[in-house]
Amino acid sequence: MSQEKNAISPTREENYPEWYQQVVKAADLAENSPVRGCMVIKPWGYGIWENMQKYLDQKIKSTGHENAYFPLFIPLSFLEKEAAHVEGFAKECAVVTHHRLEERNGKLIPTGELEEPLIVRPTSETIIGESFSRWVESYRDLPLLINQWANVVRWEMRPRIFLRTAEFLWQEGHTVHASSEEAFEETLKMLEVYREFVENILAIPVITGEKSPGERFPGAVSTYTIEMMVQDRKALQGGTSHFLGQNFAKASNIRFSNKDGETEYGHTTSWGITTRLIGALIMTHGDDDGIRLPPKIAHRQVVILPIMPKPEHEAAVLGQAEKVAQELRSSTFNGQPISVHVDKRDLRGGEKNWEWIKKGVPIRIEIGPRDVENQVVTLCRRDQPHKTKITIPVAELSQKLPLILEDMQNNYFAQALQFRDSHIRRDIHTFEELKQFFTPKNADKPEIHGGFVLAKWCGDPETEKMLDDLKVTIRCLPLEQSETEGTCILTGKKAKLDVILAKSY
C-alpha cells in the first residue's frame, strides 16, 4: 500500500524549519520583501492579524484603555535617558541620520545631516513618556491608560517570517498609576488578557510566569510572559507585560501632585503582542498538509466548493451554494456571524480543495448536483483526515455548524495541550542531566529530544550564564509555584523556585 502524499514537503519530522517556510508559502500568508529581514503580509495572513486586532482591541478597550498614536521616530537623546533601556536595544536600532537625497553622477546620495539622529521606533516607552510627562499633573489625571497599534523596527540578523523580522506589527500598551500596587495589578491584569486571548481564541495553551533577570525587558523592574511550546518542542514567547516601577517615570519626568499636595513620580507599565502570534498558530497547530486555523481566529470559517460536472448543473449548484451561504451567515459562532466564502473560480475541484486545506480553513463544504437533489451537503473538517466527509441535511446545517466549530476549537486546544504536557520533563535535577537532555546526540531518547524542563533554581542571576553554551534559557518562573524545596539544577544548592528551561525562538 503506497504512503499517502502530503501537501507540504519536507514534513515536520524531516526538516521542521523548512516545513515552516513551506507552510507560510503554501497558505499564501506572507513573503519576503526586497528589504532584507522585512516581510509582505498577504491578504490571508493579514486577515488573521485583523481578527487578532479585533478581539484584542475590544478587550483592551473594555478594561478602560484608549487608543492613541505616537511618532515612528524617536530622538536619540530620549533613548539615552534610561541606561538599561538603551543598552538593551542599542544593537537592534535602525538610525536615521539624514533628511534628504541629492543626485550626483546618476546616484542618489543622502545629504542634509540631522542635528540629532532619530531612532526608528524599536519600542515606545521613551517617546510616549515625553507626552505623559505633559499629560500628567495631578493624581486626578491617573490612571492614564493608553494603547497603540503600530509597527516597530528591530534590526534582525537572522530573520524568519512572522517569528523574527526587522519590521513587525504589534500593539503596545502604556499606563501611568498613582501607586506601585496599582501599576503591578495592571501588569498582571494585562498578562491575563493575553493568556485568555491566546488560549481561548488561538487555542494555544500557555504557561504564565515572570521572566528571570537575564530575560527581563531592559529597564523594567519585572517582566511577565506567556510561554508556549511549538511542535519542535521549543518555546515561543507569546506576549509580555512589564512592571516598570518608577524607572521610566524618572527618565521622562512623569510627575504628579498626590492627594497631600506632594509631588511624586508615577508608576508605569507597558505590554504588547505582535504578528509573531501568526507564526505561533502555524507552529502549534500546523500539520504536513499546511496550517490549521482554529475557528475563532479564522477570518473565513467556511468555504463552499460548488461541484459542476457539466455546464447544465451550474445554475442549480451555484444557486444552492449561495442559499446555503446566506443561511450560514445568519448563524453565529463565538458571538459573531459565521464567515462564509463561496469559491466560484473556474478551477478543478481537487485543486481548489487542496488550496483551502493548505490555507487551514476550518470547514470545507462540497455541493454537487446529487447534493442539490437530495438537499444535503458534504462537509469536511480541517482537524480530521482530508478524505473524511460528513453528509448533513441542508435543513440541519445552520444548527449543527456552530457546534462543529466549537468542537474543532476545543479539539485544537486539547491536542496542543496534550503535546505540551507530554513534553515537560520533571525528572531532570542536575546540570549534567540538563546538558544531556538538550544535546541531541547524548539524549537518552533522541526521538523525543527537547521540550520544557521544570526544575528548581536558586535565583542567582549569575548562574543563567551557565546556560549560554547549551542555547537554553530560563523561559519563566511560573506564577503557580509549588513552594517545595529541592536542589538548584544549575548549582546543586538548596532552592525553592520553580523554573521552566527550554530552547526558544
Image (cartoon, rainbow, N blue to C red):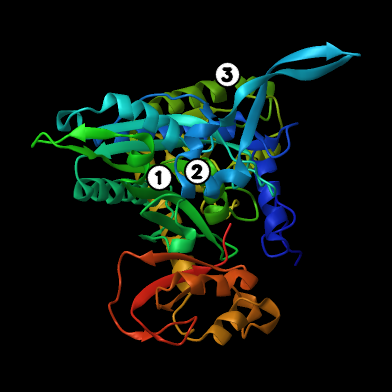
The percent position of residue 459, horizontal first and vertical second, equals 40, 73
Q: Residue at x 68, y 59 (%)?
A: 16
Q: Identify the disc placed on residue 415.
A: none
Give how far apart the Cα atoms at labels 1 and 2 are: 8 Å
In the picture, the disc for residue 405 is 1
* Left/right of residue 197 with respect to residue 15 in the rendered view: left
Secondary element at image label 1: helix
- Label 3 sits on what residue type? Ala
Q: Earlier in the sequence, mark 1 or mark 3?
A: 3
Circles 1 and 2, Cβ within 8 Å, touching? The answer is yes
| Residue closer to the observer: 180 or 210 | 180
Badge 2: residue crowd in 10 Å (few <14, some 14–19, many ≥20): many
Query: Where residue 40 sits in the image (x, y, percent)?
Result: 65, 31
Query: Quick check: can you spot residue 116?
Result: yes
- On screen, residue 201 above or below 18: above
In this view, which residue lies farthest toward the right?
105
Q: Toward the viewer: 332 or 365?
A: 332
Work out which quarter of the rendered image holds the C terminus and state it: bottom right
Please name the residue that numbered disc 2 is placed on.
Answer: 362
The amino acid sitting under disc 1 is Leu
Q: Secondary structure at mark 3?
A: helix
